[in-house]
Image (spheres, helix red, strand yellow):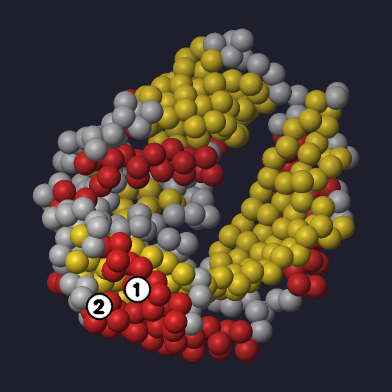
Amino acid sequence: MTARTALSLQTGLGTLQGKVSDVLKLAKQLGATQAEAHANFGTGFSVNVRMREVETLRHQRDQGLSVTVWLGHRKGSASTSDLRPEALEESVRKACALAKYGAEDPASGLADANRLAKNVPDLSLYHPWAIDPAAAIELATACEAAALDHDPRVTNSEGASVSTSEGLRVYGNSHGFLGGYPESDHSISCSVVAVQDGAMETDYEYAVARDAADLPPPAEVGAEAGRRTVARLGGTKLETRTAPVLFPARVARGLIGHLLGAISGGALYRKSSFLVDALGKPVFASRVTIDEKPHLPKGLNSAPFDNEGVTTTERRLVDSGVLGGYLLGSYYARKLGMQTTGNAGGAHNLVVHDTGKSFGELVQMMGNGLIIADLMGSGINPVTGDYSRGASGFWVENGKIQYPVTEITIAGNLKDMYQHILGIGTDVDRRGGVLTGSILVEEMTVAGS
């Protein structure tokens, strides 16, 4: 981004806050007893290169504002991508008109005023990248070339991409809260195809960061995509068995992600969670500890306040296996007779503590078992915790990888899987909102031929 763009985003924060303030004032004038508004602006571009040729170049510019009003406990909402005064006024009037016909809901309304953030700390979320499309194309080309040149069996490509975006988030409500901040996201990715004996395999690698200076060299990303793809060639089926399963860090993130849905307010209130009434009880093996750290500098899920303006705070979510908290916004907190946890909109950077083992040591610890390379499908029952996913990976014997495996299914129950975690690796994957190393589960059903 150019220095001019960066400057416009910085000065645009005040402009966007002004629009939110105007919307809230108008809502009050129209009789709303409470009101809130979210506004956003974003700009960026992405390039995609395939087989050493430019395939796409996309520029994007997005903006919008949504407003919610309450007439007592009746709620109405409207949104617009047009930020002109007349369009904003129309949205507020529509929201108020809808609220007149809304159902009464005593739990509905703004977060309590005393829970709102008093200040907005700088979490280092905004790092504009001074790159133009021509330079981005060079990086994407270098990334793909490293993958294609990694091994002669890499014969095709699904493309390499470089993207950059930056934007603004603003939230305000009629309790007097008005906050906002700029943020940025940059990424490099590559996916290629390898062929051996007429069989094809594909895999990918990517990197994402708030600050482009934290991205690895494009050639490193491409070479890893090539390595991962070639390693999957020659896959075979397994006979059905029970065995330990090692989820590498990039896959383990999803395993912990199922926890988030299970302890969210909506699922708990509807009793559509396998962890209903689990607060204060052991839900993981005692070696598992998980913290929520919303203020990590440059964190991909860092935020100074949640979607209701409630201040975010660091806390221990799982302490030696015991569940210490839920993920609640104000609405479901009231429904459950509890207090908001500052998680309207989701969790903010879950950090899973490792157990001191490297990935290689976890493989040794597993002895004979399965390392997951990729998971397919979404066979998760959120009510019972039953877990069944299509998979591919590598079979291990005596602590050493023997051969790739494909067309298998792994199955178990999340409650049992969580309780039987044997180790968590030091190889933390930081490319998302769940920061975890590899996770070794004591036993699962591995279904094959």
Numbered disc 1: secondary structure: helix
Q: Quadrant of the N terminus?
A: bottom right
**Residue 201, quarter of the rendered image:** top right
> Quarter of the image holding residue 39?
bottom left
Q: Position of residue 346 (x, y in %)?
A: 35, 54
Q: Earlier in the sequence, mark 2 or mark 1?
A: 2
Q: Is residue 71 above or below residue 283?
A: below
Query: Is residue 342 in sight in this rendering?
Result: no
Does 251 sit left or right of 112 as displayed? right
Q: Amino acid at mark 2?
A: Leu
**Which residue lies under the disc numbered 1?**
92
Neighbor class of circle 2 (other Cα within 10 Å; few <14, some 14-19, many 20+) is few
Q: Nearer the viewer, residue 73 or 301?
A: 73
Q: Residue sitting at 30 percent across and 66 percent down?
A: 97
**What's the residue type where badge 1 is placed?**
Val
Residue at x 34%, y 79% (from the top left corner): 23
